[in-house]
């Protein structure tokens, strides 16, 4: 592999000091969503984000998350946003609709606004999978939000 010494590399920065983070959380499958939130908030604090710089908005379900993310992104009050939710497969096609459309909406808001958004809307086959993944996914969302906010500030 060719070595490149003439480029500028932006190092990963996981310091949350001074960052303002908006979180949108679905209330559907609330036990899982609160587990996501707990892990996320704990990780944000661990990395220096203070409680006063975290704003939480809750919405009925995953399909409502992108609308609130869009409003937050346009407000200019946040450095990064986090989407928390749980879409758990049921017996109907509704799972695919909610999983696909909420994911597409989050991505569209991020691209249209230029705001980094960590998508932690779980899509699982059952409750057990969601409960098993909520802590790790909540933690990951916080780290992604911090890293991407710092990266975009540097660019």
Image: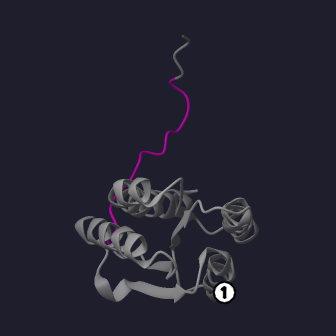
92 vs 85, left or right, is right
**Residue in view at x 48 percent, y 78 percent:** 23
Give how far across and how far down residue 7 sits, in percent: 55, 33
**Residue in view at x 35 percent, y 54 percent:** 132
Q: Is residue 15 magenta?
A: yes
Give how far across and how far down residue 123 sits, in percent: 56, 57
Give how far across and how far down residue 143 sits, in percent: 39, 58
Q: Quadrant of the N terminus?
A: top right
**Residue in view at x 32 percent, y 71 percent:** 17
Q: Which residue is mark 1?
A: 71
**Residue in view at x 29 percent, y 65 percent:** 43
Q: Is residue 59 above or below residue 134?
A: below
Q: Choose between 108 and 6: the one closer to the eye.
A: 108
**Res. 92 image quadrant:** bottom right
Q: Is residue 48 above or below residue 139?
A: below
- Crowding at dot 1, Cα within 10 Å, few <14 / some 14-19 / many 20+, comes out as few
Q: Farthest residue toward the left?
A: 46
The magenta span reads 5-17
**Res. 50 image quadrant:** bottom left
Give how far across and how far down residue 4 sits, in percent: 54, 21
64 vs 9, left or right, is right
How was the colour assigned to the protein in this rendering? Answer: one colour
Q: Choose between 97 and 9: the one closer to the eye.
A: 97
Q: Quadrant of the C terminus?
A: bottom right
Name the dominant secondary structure of the magenta segment. Answer: loop
Q: Is residue 55 magenta?
A: no
Regarding mark 1 in the picture, which secondary structure is present there? Answer: helix
């Amino acid at each position: 592999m060719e070595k490149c010494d003439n480029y500028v590399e932006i190092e990963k920065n996981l310091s949350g000091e001074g960052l303002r983070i908006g979180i949108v959380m679905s209330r559907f499958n609330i036990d899982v969503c609160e587990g996501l939130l707990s892990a996320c908030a704990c990780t944000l604090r661990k990395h220096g984000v203070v409680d006063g710089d975290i704003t939480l908005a809750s919405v009925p379900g995953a399909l409502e998350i992108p609308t609130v993310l869009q409003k937050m992104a346009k407000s200019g009050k946040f450095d990064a946003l986090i989407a928390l939710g749980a879409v758990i497969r049921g017996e109907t096609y509704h799972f695919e609709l909610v999983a696909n459309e909420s994911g597409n909406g989050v991505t569209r808001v991020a691209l249209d606004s230029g705001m980094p958004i960590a998508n932690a809307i779980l899509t699982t086959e059952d409750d057990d999978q969601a409960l098993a993944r909520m802590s790790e996914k909540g933690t990951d969302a916080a780290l992604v939000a911090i890293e991407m906010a710092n990266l975009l500030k540097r660019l």
